[in-house]
Amino acid sequence: MLPPPIPPGPGQESVWDYPRPPRLELSPKPVRVEFNGVVLAQSDRAYRVLETSHPPSYYLPPEDVQMRYLLPTLRASFCEWKGQARYYTVMVDDREAIDGAWVYLEPTASFAAIAGYVAFYPSLMDACYVGDDRAEPQPGGFYGGWVTPDVVGPFKGVPGSWGW
């Protein structure tokens, strides 16, 4: 059963006010990703995807990502809204995050702006930031949403939410 949405406070957004199908928009705040002592990505030109029941996922332009630490893998997945995703293992020195990042090389027309942009699973990174706020991973491990104090749920991914 779907729990009631949490009312947003001042400066917050409810993921239940996000649209379905999802919307793409420029992030109002800079985004940073860290792994094994390296700033993998830092951008004030990131996009975020807003979808009902999901905290935003962030897509960073490849020029703002240290691509030398990303190794293409054979994994692929399909999103009904964005198309086919390809994955990267993040490797910095002796640490790796298998399939820790993904990209849509040829997204659908609605998401053409993020072609080649890189997204990261915050659960597999050491730290992900939106502005000065450290993001927590979206529950459940399957989705790549970033939970910050700016968004309230409940979020898809918690136990019992697969039918939402």
Image: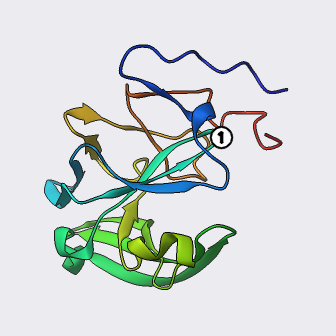
Q: Give the image quarter of residue 114.
A: bottom left
Callout 1 secondary element:
loop
* Amino acid type shown at disc 1: Gly
At a point 29% along the width and 47% down the height, the residue shown is 126
Q: Position of residue 164 (x, y in %)?
A: 79, 40
The one of 48 and 144 positioned closer to us in this rendering: 48
User: Does 10 appear above or below 18?
Assistant: above
Q: How is the image coloured?
A: rainbow
User: Does 106 appear above or below 158?
Assistant: below
User: Does 161 appear above or below 20?
Assistant: above
Q: Position of residue 106 (x, y in %)?
A: 50, 85
Looking at the image, residue 157 sits to the left or right of residue 64; the answer is right
Looking at the image, residue 143 sits to the left or right of residue 44; the answer is right
Q: Position of residue 79 (x, y in %)?
A: 65, 69
Instruction: Kindly identify which residue carries mark 1.
Output: 157
At a point 58% along the width and 27% down the height, the residue shown is 153
Q: How many marks?
A: 1
Looking at the image, residue 73 sits to the left or right of residue 84; the answer is left
Q: Position of residue 139 (x, y in %)?
A: 57, 38
The one of 10 and 56 positioned closer to us in this rendering: 10
At a point 64% along the width and 38% down the height, the residue shown is 53
Callout 1 environment at 10 Å: few (<14), some (14 to 19), or many (20+)?
A: some
Image quadrant holding the N terminus, namely top right
At a point 62% along the width and 27% down the height, the residue shown is 154
Q: Give the image quarter of residue 4.
A: top right
